[in-house]
């Protein structure tokens, strides 16, 4: 059956619901500040699914589109920023939801995009991906690894599901840690009891990946909480400023990039 979805163009194009029958997949954290954000401001973590572009970490915090009002024409939603325009058309399919994106910018423009989906998951939930997928992990995980962190490295890489000895597929109970990872994969599947959700991204000629933010009560430093982000991406790092060759999407000579986000009720991983 299709997934039911709701978006909020007036407040950054945020997805506020992704429902499979009685199951709501999106986690929420009410914060009145989310209603009053302005471009360039600090990110307000209210849950749902935020569109992050042209970066996730770095500046502007979680990108430049989540804090701007979008416009809607028919079934297409659009946001205009200084360097680019992003349009999105979201439709139900037979077994889920597809979102088709078009970004228009000057040729050569580099960016990272993430569907920053914070999911409402039990302590028994697992993230499934193909074993051995190269997985980058970031400095906040340095004390949890089986090897010392290289001086100045923006990330280190190992194989899924336990890169550098850190088991990441079990989303788990609160233990005071918070770690980010980026899998060189175009799809993953979340298993939570009998429920399944597959998240996938397709973009011809662009680097794709899926990010994981596994916050088990380790963030923020004051008043931490538990949250889990599973985030299909264009690019292969959280911060555009850290992107080396092949780590960011790039606008070709035609001046536009198209991609597709697919959310499916069921497991579609190999």
Image (spheres, grey):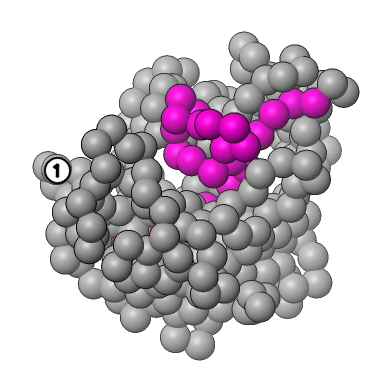
| Residue 16 seen in this snapshot | no
Given residues 88 and 22, the one toward you in this image is 88
Q: Residue furthest right?
A: 254
Q: Residue furthest bottom?
A: 194
Q: Residue furthest top?
A: 82
| Residue at the (52%, 24%) spot, across then down | 64
Q: Secondary structure at mark 1?
A: loop
* Above or below: residue 55 compared with residue 172: above
| Residue at the (20%, 66%) spot, across then down | 174
Is residue 244 toward the left or the right of residue 27 in the image?
right
* Rendered location of residue 251, percent (x, y): 74, 26
| Residue at the (37%, 32%) spot, across then down | 43
Q: Quadrant of the C terminus?
A: bottom right
Is residue 18 toward the left or the right of residue 206 in the image?
left
How many labels were placed on the picture?
A: 1
> 10 Å neighbourhood of mark 1: few (<14), some, or many (≥20)?
few
**Residue 168, image quadrant:** bottom left
Is residue 60 toward the left or the right of residue 78 in the image?
left
* Above or below: residue 70 compared with residue 95: above
Q: Provide the residue designation for mark 1.
A: 221
Q: Quadrant of the N terminus?
A: bottom right
Residues in magenta, as a range: 226-252
Check if residue 247 falls in the magenta segment. Answer: yes
Given residues 138 and 51, the one toward you in this image is 138
Check if residue 197 falls in the magenta segment. Answer: no
* Above or below: residue 83 compared with residue 50: above
Given residues 83 and 97, the one toward you in this image is 83
| Residue at the (69%, 29%) spot, across then down | 250
* Rendered location of residue 209, percent (x, y): 58, 52
* Rendered location of residue 161, percent (x, y): 42, 71
């Amino acid at each position: 059956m299709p997934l039911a979805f709701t978006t909020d163009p007036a407040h950054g194009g945020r997805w506020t619901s992704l429902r499979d029958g009685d199951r709501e997949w999106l986690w929420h954290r009410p914060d009145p500040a989310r209603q009053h954000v302005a471009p360039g401001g600090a990110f307000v973590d209210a849950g749902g699914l935020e569109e992050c572009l042209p970066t996730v970490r770095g500046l502007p915090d979680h990108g430049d589109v989540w804090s701007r009002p979008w416009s809607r024409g028919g079934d297409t939603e659009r946001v205009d920023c200084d360097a680019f325009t992003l349009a999105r058309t979201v439709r139900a399919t037979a077994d889920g939801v597809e979102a088709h994106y078009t970004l228009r910018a000057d040729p050569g423009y580099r960016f990272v995009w993430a569907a920053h989906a914070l999911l409402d998951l039990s302590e028994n939930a697992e993230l499934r991906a193909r074993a051995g997928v190269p997985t980058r992990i970031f400095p906040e995980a340095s004390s949890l690894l089986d090897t010392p962190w290289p001086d100045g490295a923006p990330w280190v890489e190992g194989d899924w599901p336990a890169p550098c000895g850190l088991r990441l597929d079990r989303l788990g109970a609160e233990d005071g840690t918070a770690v980010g990872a980026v899998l060189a994969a175009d799809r993953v599947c979340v298993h939570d009891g009998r429920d399944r959700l597959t998240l996938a991204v397709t973009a011809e000629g662009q680097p794709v990946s899926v990010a994981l933010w596994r916050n088990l009560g380790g963030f923020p430093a004051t008043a931490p909480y538990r949250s889990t982000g599973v985030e299909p991406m264009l690019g292969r790092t959280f911060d555009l400023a850290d992107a080396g060759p092949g780590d960011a999407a790039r606008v070709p000579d035609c001046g536009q990039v198209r991609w597709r986000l697919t959310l499916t009720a069921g497991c579609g991983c190999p």
